[in-house]
Image (cartoon, grey):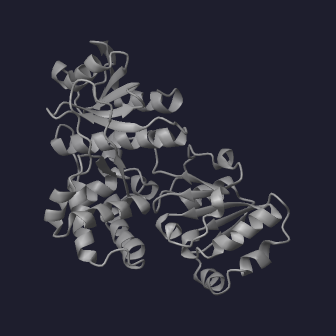
Amino acid sequence: MAVLERNLQISKELDGSIFLFGARQTGKSTILRQQFPNSIYLDLLDTSLKNRFFKKPSLLYEMLNEEKEGTLVIIDEIPEVPELLNEVHRLISERGLTFILCGSSARKLKRKGRNTLGGRALPVYLYPLVSAEIPDFDINRAVNYGMIPSHYLAQNPSRRLAAYIDIYLKEEIKEESLVRNLNAFHRFLEVAALTDGEIVNNNNIAQDCGVSASTVASYFDILEDTLIGYRIPAFRKVKKRRLMQAPRFYYFDIGVANHLLQRKELIRGTVEYGHAFEHLVIQELYAWLHYTHSEEELTYWHTYTNIEVDAIIGDARIAIEIKSVEEVLPRHLKGLKAFGEEYPESRRIIVSLDPINRRTDNIECIYVLDFFKLLWHEGL
């Protein structure tokens, strides 16, 4: 498998210790080994090491208490033995060591009584690959198989995607007893995929899954805590038009959503390709905002009369519509024109497969690959 250079330079984040979070197989262990080859590295997926620390957490302090101040220690999969956080706290306070604490779920660390280091370690997130990290980036491959490194680069990504969901259900959900009814949760994953990129309606999803609306809400919380999905809030400022206020939900990677929906070999021009294309662009925007430490929020704009814009950045600074069309026509600009009536100072962009970049009605039409280059090399 090719070794790719990631945009996230963790050394720039190391103003003290950090928690490095990311969904399974996003490349956390790989990036840590690449960027910090001389660190002390403890992998808690090593069963024997995990068992020893589980039986005696203070063993970590005994192991490291004579290391020099500033020594970097990486503990991979820290949620496997969260009791170690007390010893990490001691080593930071007493010995001045620096830690990178890595995991695929923040949920285990949120439980009552867990030591979260009192702000001594800031959270940093690693996302799936982004277009700027891939030489000869293939938009159709990304739309079909997603951007998890082992899936995008694989010869047979479909099998890997199936295994990914099975591993997630077994290791993150079943083993942690996060839900009482695993079958209902599996059904929820599929129904959530049907609403991927759509406005969340807990009551409708509850009817489809045979559980309560409150259970659905808790299921969405589990997806966010285990970094499998996230909710994009609605744009809240109301001027002329009444706006929807419920969030939209996205799986963290379009390949996961495609697998759950049994979407295979998506073809340009189809509705399914359009949904996946929109998700991919949102996925890039979401990662870009986090990697650049932007304080601007990513939202969407949707009126009660069903006029919408897919992505709003900040306080109406930028409005982005996403269409998988190969020729942008006036009817594709309806949402951006309506948004411009309320926010004439906003920058309005339509991202599409149309290769002719141009400006029409004060709206920028940008080819998707040029938009990605703009995003990662210049910013918006």
Report x, y in % for residue 161. Answer: 34, 62
Q: Tell me if I can see residue 135 in this picture.
A: no
Say which of 304 and 173 sits in front: 304
**182 relative position to 174: left or right:** left
Say which of 324 and 227 sits in front: 227
Q: Give the residue at x 49% y 63%.
A: 106
Q: Tell me if I can see residue 154 in this picture.
A: yes
Q: Give the residue at x 62% y 63%.
A: 101
Q: Quadrant of residue 245?
A: top left
**158 relative position to 284: left or right:** left
**12 relative position to 368: left or right:** right
Q: How many marks?
A: 0
Report x, y in % for residue 8. Answer: 58, 46
Q: Give the residue at x 56% y 73%.
A: 113
Report x, y in % for residue 260. Answer: 25, 60
Q: Give the residue at x 46% y 63%.
A: 24
With respect to residue 179, does 331 lie above or below?
A: above
Report x, y in % for residue 255. Answer: 33, 54
Q: Quadrant of residue 182?
A: bottom left
With respect to residue 321, does 275 lie above or below?
A: below
